[in-house]
Amino acid sequence: MSKQDKVWMDSEVPTVTVIHSENRYPDRSGATHDPDEAVAEVTYSQPLPTYDGKLHEDDLDKVLGYAWRWTNNVDGSWSRKELKLADEDGLLHENGDYNENVKVLLPNPRYEGREMGRRSSMVGDLYILNTEAGSIMYSVDDFGFTNLNDKIKNAINENPVAEAV
């Protein structure tokens, strides 16, 4: 086995911490939600290969996309950890957004005595991709995700602090 073959043999299962940014629109009671709440931790569905301890860039996009899909209310509720949900008439329906790889970090809100679900992820939310090599913070954009670690590094490099004399 060559050294290069060995490097790709390691694998890991990354996670994404989902932080919902402040909802600027009031809910039914007129209140806005607390800013920057960590609402979920999403574990990717399978191990991914690593190269020198790091995931491939294409795999990073897969992991972020997976977290996006499973923190959106498409056909049920991602945050209500039930396989079936009751509608207003009490009839049970399949919860198409249930995923055992999503850990809900906060209790769900209640409205008029009923458990509601958490909102879907949206533009402006933050995702922290956690790997064995470290963590990378991303913002959800109109199309895809922006690596905030790179933006911060670039801003620092473009505006160096002058040395004291």
Image (cartoon, rainbow, N blue to C red):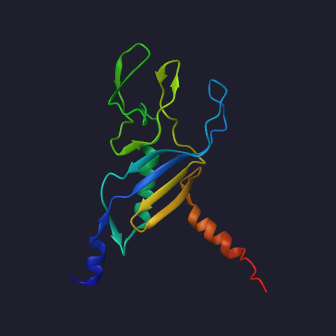
Seen from the viewer's position, the closer of residues 93 and 100 is 100
Q: Residue furthest front?
A: 165
Q: Is residue 140 above or below residue 150?
A: above
- Whether residue 102 sits left or right of residue 1 in the image: it is right
Picture residue at 38% right of the left edge, 58% below the top: 14
Q: Residue furthest right?
A: 165
Q: Is residue 163 above or below residue 15?
A: below
What is the quadrant of residue 152 in the picture? bottom right
The image position of residue 95, as x and y in percent, is: 36, 30
Seen from the viewer's position, the closer of residues 134 and 9 is 134
What is the quadrant of residue 8 in the picture? bottom left
The image position of residue 159, as x and y in percent, is: 72, 74
Q: Quadrant of the N terminus?
A: bottom left
Picture residue at 34% right of the left edge, 45% below the top: 101
Q: Quadrant of the C terminus?
A: bottom right
Picture residue at 66% right of the left edge, 34% below the top: 25
Count all numbered tags in the image, as a single digit: 0
Picture residue at 43% right of the left edge, 48% below the top: 41
- Whether residue 100 sits left or right of residue 113 in the image: it is left
- Whether residue 146 sits left or right of residue 26 in the image: it is left
Q: Residue furthest bottom?
A: 165
The image position of residue 10, as x and y in percent, is: 29, 70
The image position of residue 143, as x and y in percent, is: 56, 52
What is the quadrant of residue 157 in the picture? bottom right
Q: Residue furthest top?
A: 89
Q: Is residue 4 above or below residue 114?
A: below
